[in-house]
Amino acid sequence: MRRRPTLHYILSFILMCLIGSPISAQHISSWQLALEKDGIEVYIHRSADMRVRGFKACATLSVPFDSLEVIFDNIEEYPEWQASIKTAKLVHEISDKKYHFQSRTKLPWPAKNHDLMWRVEKGWDERDGSLVYKQVCSTNTMPDKLLQGSVLQAFASWRLKPVNEDEVEITYYLTVDKGGKVPSWIINLLSPDNPYDTIVNLQAMRPGDMDELVLD
């Protein structure tokens, strides 16, 4: 007898489809423009028929693609540009394309910072020529020794699409399961200011900063 899929795996499948498919992720009824400034667009996901909420941020950066890839591969430097991260470190490496990193989420006082564990899969999407970093934060995706005791389903995706030698189109997604009571610290992560500030930080990085990362 075949076992019926559980709600947990159904939700996981829906979320992975949402962040993994540019077509479905940009469905007109799923995303609403929340912020548009300095060439950056941030959309909020407010679909009534799905148990998820999240954001999508889009921009074109004047950065060589190779330099941007180095920045994304240098995990310990994430706090330099990711607005919500206080610290980050590699904790489990399967290969340079599959690994886990731990991040401490930076929250305004009096909220407490939170440690999160992310599984990352890096690869090319041949459909549109984007380099994709898929990130999953979920206790059922981590090695036993990395379990932190919290139950959280969150999915992030960075898509880096070369436009020319000096420009990259970047799209950033973050979605979470909104079933039940959503903690205030998760709501803070989903604020349009978070992805906006993150992309502004990337834009502000000087070529010399990137050269130092490459040399390291």
Image (cartoon, grey):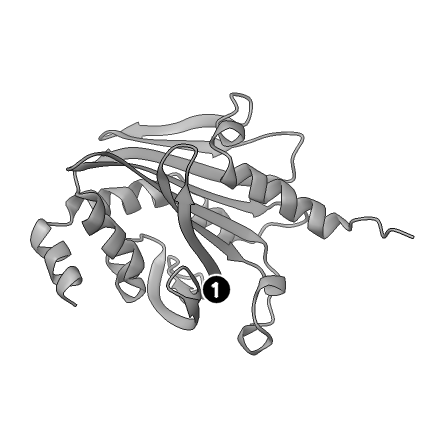
In this rendering, position of residue 194 left or right of residue 30:
left
**Relative to 12, is 102 above or below?**
below
Residue 118 in percent (x, y) is at 47, 61
Residue found 43% across the figure and 33% down from its top:
127
Q: Residue furthest top?
A: 28
Circle 1: element type = strand
Residue 81 in percent (x, y) is at 26, 53
Q: Is residue 185 shown to the viewer in this render?
A: no
Of the pair 105 and 4, the residue shown nearer to us: 4
In this rendering, position of residue 30 left or right of residue 60:
right
**Relative to 26, is 124 above or below?**
below
In this rendering, position of residue 204 left or right of residue 123:
left
Q: Which residue position holds label 1?
A: 116
Residue 184 in percent (x, y) is at 52, 52
Of the pair 157 and 78, the residue shown nearer to us: 157
Q: Which residue lies furthest to the front in this view?
A: 126
Residue found 67% across the figure and 45% down from its top:
11
Residue found 92% across the figure and 53% down from its top:
1
In this rendering, position of residue 14 left or right of residue 189:
right
Q: How crowded is mark 1: few (under 14 residues within 10 Å), some or many (20 or more)?
A: some
Q: Quadrant of residue 113?
A: bottom left
Q: Quadrant of residue 61?
A: top left
Disc 1 residue type (three-letter):
Leu
Residue 162 in percent (x, y) is at 26, 37
The quarter of the image holding the C terminus is bottom left
Q: Which residue lies furthest to the left in this view?
A: 208
Q: Residue furthest right?
A: 1
**Relative to 67, is 114 above or below?**
below
Count of all numbered marks drawn on residues in the image: 1
Q: Is residue 141 shown to the viewer in this render?
A: yes
Residue found 59% across the figure and 58% down from its top:
152
